[in-house]
Image (spheres, rainbow, N blue to C red):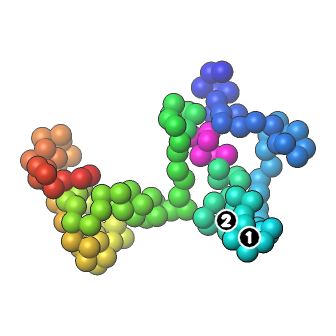
């Protein structure tokens, strides 16, 4: 398939319940479970839902990646990415970030020993100068 077809159908199979070529949108926020500690794959839509799973599969197809993750907000994506760096990590950022991102750095993540350095300008050289060998994780 080409890019245009992948953008519409990438990572998707016909709906197994109905055979629909285009899967339905799942608008439910909660999902019934067969029993305690048993799941059919989804519990609450903020943690995952069939529509988002299909979107992630489509994005992975378009990027020729093994998987993709979608988040409810940019801040959720930033927090998840920074969590991969771990406590005590050094992170190089750009100048002029969204205020909420800066507050996340200063008010939350520094409490985990993370440090942040903003590159002075948007050039590869400025980012290279901000690196701390052995400490910089992102």
- Location of residue 87 in the rendering, given as x and y in whole percent from the top left corner: 26, 67
Secondary structure character of the magenta stretch overall: helix
- Location of residue 38 in the rendering, given as x and y in whole percent from the top left corner: 72, 67
Tell me if 30 is positioned left or right of 87 in this view: right
Of 118 and 114, nearer the camera is 114
Disc 2 from disc 1: Cα separation: 6 Å
Q: How crowded is mark 2: few (under 14 residues within 10 Å), some or many (20 or more)?
A: some
Return the residue found at the far right: 18
Tell me if 35 is positioned left or right of 48 in this view: right
Visible in this render: residue 45? yes
Write the start and end of the magenta stretch as one range: 54-59
Give the number of the disc on residue 43: none
Give the residue number, with chain letter if any, for mark 2.
45
Quadrant for residue 79, please give it.
bottom left
**Secondary element at image label 2:** loop
Of 24 and 43, nearer the camera is 43
Give the residue number, with chain letter if any, for mark 1.
30
Which residue: 55% across, 38% down? 60
Q: Mark 2 vs mark 1: which is more N-terminal?
A: 1
- Location of residue 133 in the rendering, given as x and y in whole percent from the top left corner: 11, 49
Tell me if 1 is positioned left or right of 86 in this view: right
Which residue: 12% across, 41% down? 125
**Secondary element at image label 1:** loop
Compared to residue 107, the image places residue 77 above or below, namely: above
**Quarter of the N terminus within the rendering:** top right
Q: Residues within 10 Å of mark 1 (few under 14, many from 20)?
A: few
Visible in this render: residue 29? no
Marks 2 and 1: CB-CB under 8 Å? yes
Which residue: 18% across, 53% down? 136
């Amino acid at each position: 398939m080409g890019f245009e077809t992948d953008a519409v159908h990438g990572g998707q199979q016909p709906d197994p319940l109905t055979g629909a070529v285009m899967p339905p949108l799942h608008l439910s926020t909660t999902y019934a479970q067969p029993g305690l500690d048993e799941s059919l794959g989804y519990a609450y839509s903020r943690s995952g839902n069939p529509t988002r799973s299909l979107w992630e599969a489509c994005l992975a197809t378009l990027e020729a990646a093994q998987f993709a993750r979608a988040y409810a907000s940019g801040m959720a994506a930033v927090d998840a990415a920074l969590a991969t760096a771990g406590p005590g990590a050094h992170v190089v950022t750009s100048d002029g970030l969204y205020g909420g991102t800066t507050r996340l750095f200063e008010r939350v993540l520094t409490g985990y020993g993370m440090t942040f350095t903003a590159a002075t300008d948007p050039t590869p050289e400025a980012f290279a100068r901000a690196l701390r060998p052995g400490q910089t994780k992102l």
